[in-house]
Image (cartoon, helix red, strand yellow):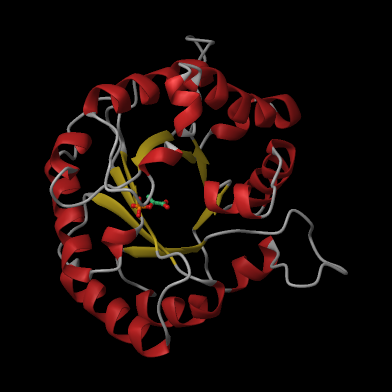
Amino acid sequence: MNKSIKKVVIANLKMNGSLSFYDDYLKGLKNGLHDIDNIDVGLCVPYPYLAQAQSILNGSNISWGSQNIAKFENGPYTGEVSATMLNDFGVQYVIVGHSERATAYCESNENIADKFNAIKKYNMTPVLCVGENLIEREAGIMEKVVASQIEAIIKCYGVEIFSDSIIAYEPIWAIGTDMAASPEQTNHMCSYIRKLINQDELNEVKNLKIVYGGSLNSENAVQLFGLKSVDGGLIGRAAINIEEFIKICQSAQTFET
Ligand code: PEP
């Protein structure tokens, strides 16, 4: 079990904000979290604000990241952003496979696997989103769905690629709905994911963090972060409000081991 690692709290700011919003937000967060050093915090901002994040957060205890990446290294891929470009802006975390993208842009599991590989190749930390939709949950096939998302990556690149990575269990029915998964559901799926990755018990994948995402907020954070199987959270709407996000980070801090 991964019990001696720091909790990690990642904000997914989605397509929100502006230059002035991020100026206030980044400075406010840097100030508000300056004395927190026993958890890892990452802010995944829209691409245009990466330079601003780098300039304001550089040297602080907060890392920054993107919400997507191209699977190609360079070339005629209009509108795409490559791993080396993200490296240029000091990116640490890259969200990959988020259901909003998988649904809107028909991303296949194989495409997501190639993006995951690009992130690892350029020494950034993937935040791989996996999870079932409501129909799949009601049909009781959530494990099968999540297994197929993860196994697509293992099949292409081997299980070791999950070292120094983050997997976010994000049931689609919990995203943006104010209907977070229960502690029991979260614990079950996060434990399932860890077992799936660490089938070879003698050779556990190193520094893999499994976090929960989906309507996480300052009210349910303590309960969810308190689960042994949960190494942190991926936070969408609640992260837009800086005070709320700081409270969530403070809850994670309580459980540092
Ligand atoms: C997300 O989309 O990654 C997410 C966790 O969203 P929310 O917290 O708003 O449900």
Which residue is painted at 19% across and 46% down in the image?
252
Quarter of the picture holding the C terminus: top left
Image height check: is 179 above or below 151? below
- The answer to which quarter of the image holds residue 24 is bottom left
Q: Is residue 206 in view from this perspective?
A: no
Q: Nearer the viewer, residue 231 or 180?
A: 180
Quarter of the picture holding the N terminus: top left
- Is 240 left, or right, of 73 in this rendering? left
Image height check: is 216 above or below 204? below
Q: Nearer the viewer, residue 10 or 185?
A: 185
- Is 199 left, or right, of 121 in this rendering? left
Q: How many marks?
A: 0
Outermost residue, right direction?
76
Which residue is painted at 18% across and 62% down in the image?
244
Which residue is painted at 30% across and 32% down in the image?
230
Image height check: is 181 above or below 236? above
- Percent from the top left, x then y, of residue 28? 22, 78
Outermost residue, bottom direction?
20
- Percent from the top left, x then y, of residue 90? 52, 69
Q: Nearer the viewer, residue 99 or 91?
A: 99
- The answer to which quarter of the image holds residue 79 is bottom right
Which residue is painted at 46% across and 69% down in the image?
45
Q: Is residue 136 in view from this perspective?
A: yes
- Percent from the top left, x then y, of residue 117? 68, 44
- Percent from the top left, x then y, of residue 127? 49, 46
- Is 20 left, or right, of 220 in this rendering? right
